[in-house]
Image: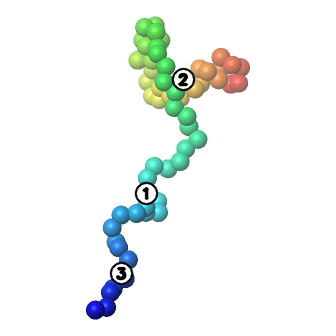
Amino acid sequence: MEEKSEKSRRGGSRPGSGRPKTSVKTYYFGASPEVYEIMEAVEGSKSQFVNDCILKACGRK
């Protein structure tokens, strides 16, 4: 008998699949009740708001 050596079409990685790489690092922190109220009032991106506040507090914006 002759054995066929066909390439399996199941499994393996696929080019372009998965999440795109980013240079963003995620941090988690406990917010006080006062900070929680402020964050809940933020419209739009909370991440952008936090980034802007930190940069402003450090004099970089």
User: Which secondary structure, mark 3?
Assistant: loop
Q: Amino acid at mark 2?
A: Val
Which residue occupies 55% across, 34% down? 25
Residue furthest to the left: 1
Crowding at label 3, few (<14), some or many (≥20) Cα neighbours within 10 Å? few
Q: Which residue is mark 3?
A: 6
The one of 29 and 39 positioned closer to us in this rendering: 29
Q: Nearer the viewer, mark 1 or mark 2?
A: 1
Q: Amino acid at mark 1?
A: Ser
Viewed as shown, does residue 14 lie left or right of 25? left
User: Which secondary structure, mark 1?
Assistant: loop
Residue 48 image label: none
Viewed as shown, does residue 43 lie left or right of 21? left
Instruction: Choose the circle earlier in sequence order: 3 or 2.
Output: 3
Instruction: Give the quarter of the figure containing the N terminus.
Output: bottom left
Which residue occupies 47% across, 29% down? 45
User: Which secondary structure, mark 2?
Assistant: helix
Instruction: Choose the circle earlier in sequence order: 3 or 1.
Output: 3
- Regarding residue 38, the answer to whether it shows in the image is no
Tell me the CA gap for discs 3 and 1. Answer: 24 Å
Q: Are marks 1 and 2 in contact (CB under 8 Å)?
A: no
Which residue occupies 46% across, 15% down? 30
Q: Which residue is mark 1?
A: 17
Tell me the CA gap for discs 3 and 2. Answer: 54 Å
Which residue occupies 46% across, 59% down? 16
Crowding at label 2, few (<14), some or many (≥20) Cα neighbours within 10 Å? few
Q: Which residue is mark 2?
A: 50
Residue 2 position in % (x across, y down): 31, 91
Q: Nearer the viewer, mark 3 or mark 2?
A: 3
Q: Are marks 3 and 2 in contact (CB under 8 Å)?
A: no
Q: Amino acid at mark 3?
A: Glu
The one of 11 and 54 positioned closer to us in this rendering: 11
